[in-house]
Image (cartoon, helix red, strand yellow):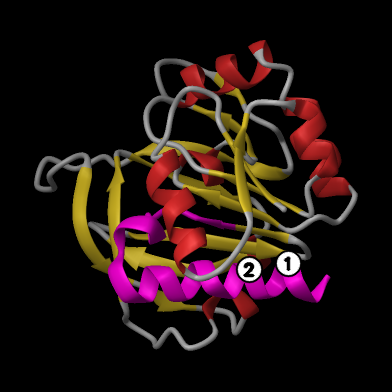
Amino acid sequence: MIAIIDYGMGNLRSVEKGFQKVGFDVRVTDSPSDIKNAEAVVLPGVGAFRDCMSSLNKLELTGAIAEAIHQGKPYLGICLGLQVLFTESEEFGHCNGLNIFKGKVVRFKSDELKIPQMGWNQLNIKQDIPLLNGIPESSYFYFVHSYYVVPEDTSIIATTTDYGLEFTSAVCKDNVYAVQFHPEKSQGLGLKLIENFGGIVKGT
């Protein structure tokens, strides 16, 4: 069973349907015990970093997520599910994240760009990882965000994307995979990525 974490924010039903469409057993849950018993964890999210961390703390999910990661369970973060892995965000003032990875979440700064970035954009693939099997260089995925992650350890960067600057759009280290874009909104290639994550879970 793959646990999709429900903390009151996020595109949960679309993510759930995506996994079901490619044949995986998922459960949308806000229960720490479900996360403990799951084979893998998916953390989707849209909205503000501070609100996300506040909800995770209130539901006592931060410890369960960190424990699952440290136990080696496959983790897939989507949008905010990527950002909260990092040390801190500057969104609406300083806010601490899960600190799985050292680094910051910062805002796009440009008078020429539309912020948030909303729509299709391409991936520059930096690492050959299982999550991206069958996904070609320069593939388009769907983005909605005003903030992006800046990892201290650049070796975890799996893909980048260009939007005024080259920013990190996916990371990978050991059992942790996370993407800034929305695979559940990215049609065929998005389903392929979800299927790839399911394959990673099956292989553990």
Residue 144: percent from left, percent from top: 28, 46
Residue at point 52%, 18% (across, down): 94
Q: Which mark is residue 201?
A: 1
Q: Which mark is residue 198?
A: 2
CB under 8 Å between callouts 2 and 1? yes
Residue at the extreme left: 112
Magenta stretch in the rendered image? 178-204
Please indicate whether residue 203 sits to the left or right of residue 121 in the image.
right
86 and 142: which is toward the camera: 142
104 and 54: which is toward the camera: 54
Vertical side of 73 occupied by 63: above or below: above
The image quadrant of residue 107 is top left
Vertical side of 196 occupied by 80: above or below: above
Residue at point 48%, 22% (across, down): 8
Please indicate whether residue 178 sits to the left or right of residue 12 in the image.
right
The stretch drawn in magenta includes residue 147: no
Magenta region, main secondary structure: helix
Q: Amino acid at mark 2?
A: Gly
Q: Amino acid at mark 1?
A: Val
Q: Which mark is residue 120?
A: none
Find numbered disc 2 in the image and state the secondary structure of the residue it sits on.
helix
- Crowd band around label 1 with a 10 angstrom C-alpha radius: few (<14), some (14–19), many (20+): some
Vertical side of 176 occupied by 21: above or below: below
Residue 84: percent from left, percent from top: 58, 36
Residue at point 28%, 59% (across, down): 142
The image quadrant of residue 55 is top right
Residue 101: percent from left, percent from top: 70, 46
Residue at the extreme right: 71
Please indicate whether residue 143 sits to the left or right of residue 52 in the image.
left
Residue at the extreme top: 58
The stretch drawn in magenta includes residue 187: yes
Residue at point 83%, 70% (across, down): 204
